[in-house]
Amino acid sequence: MDKSKLQLYFIAGTTNLGDRNLLDVLQAALKGGITAFQLREKGEGALQGDALKTLAEQCKQLCNEYKVPFIVNDDVDLAIAVDADGVHIGQEDGDIAEVRKKIGSDKILGVSTHSVTDAMTASDAGANYVGVGPLFETASKENAGTPVGPELVRQVVNVLPGLPMVGIGGITERKAGRVIREGASGVAVISAIAHAKDVEQAARAMKGVITLASTGV
Ligand code: TZP
Ligand code: MG
């Protein structure tokens, strides 16, 4: 896949947003320059069934307008049903090669990884990109596990230099540059954008940091 699509990867679901409307937040983030979006509808009060499918279709439509890939977390059947651009799965979400077979070779497959071994396995099984983390402490994921630290990004890049990869977990505007300098293609964030006072501005500022760090300035 095109690594530049991973530069600023925004992840959200309705349960991350309090009173905010997901489509409003997504639109603001798209205006601010996010390069990929993942719908991650999880936890208490998460939408299901038709309501979730409708939301996914609306997110996809909005992402299409900005030519930004729309990825569905975990739910392979939903991703297929709404013809999403891809699916993202974790280590406990089934066999990676099976998911690849199910979605076909044209769709993006992302896999969460916590070690170099995980990343090698995901790459061998047909992942287009991996998420590496949690790099730092995060309040956005239950049982996220002990932070692996930004050094793991460099270790994965050293072993798998061609594999597109995003760092994830507790990444703020202040920490994003470090993650890029360790060799990540981009950063994946929930709260840095979803909880920002001004979502569009937060995305734009983060994108600026990433662009600067990527060009080595
Ligand atoms: N996977 C590992 S950490 C995490 C996920 C989904 C949460 C990232 O959220 P935040 O708010 O950017 O730390
Ligand atoms: Mg999962």
Image: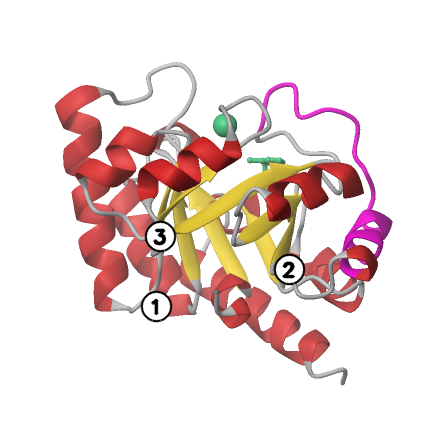
Residue 195: percent from the left, percent from the top?
49, 43
Beta carbon of the mark 1 residue lies under 8 A of ligand 1: no
Residue 130: percent from the left, percent from the top?
60, 48
Q: Residues within 10 Å of mark 1 (few under 14, many from 20)?
A: some
Q: Nearer the viewer, residue 130 or 176?
A: 130
Cα separation between marks 2 and 1:
28 Å
Q: Secondary structure at mark 1?
A: helix
* Residue linked to disc 3: 107
Q: Nearer the viewer, residue 114 or 24?
A: 114
Can you tell which mark lies on residue 163?
2
73 displayed left or right of 96: left
| Amino acid under disc 2 | Leu
3 vs 1, front mark: 3
Going 56% across and 53% down the picture, which residue do you hit? 129
Q: Residues within 10 Å of mark 2 (few under 14, many from 20)?
A: many
Cα separation between marks 3 and 1:
25 Å
| CB atoms of marks 3 and 2 within 8 Å | no
Cα separation between marks 3 and 2:
16 Å
Query: Which region of the structure is painted magenta?
Result: 141-157
Q: Earlier in the sequence, mark 3 or mark 2?
A: 3
2 vs 1, front mark: 2
Q: Nearer the viewer, residue 158 or 71?
A: 158
Q: Earlier in the sequence, mark 2 or mark 1?
A: 1
Quadrant assignment for the C terminus: bottom right
Going 18% across and 32% down the picture, which residue do you hit? 53
* Residue linked to disc 1: 31
From what the image shows, is residue 18 above or below residue 136? above
Q: In this rendering, does residue 133 appear at all?
A: no
Q: In this rendering, does residue 112 appear at all?
A: yes
| Amino acid under disc 3 | Lys
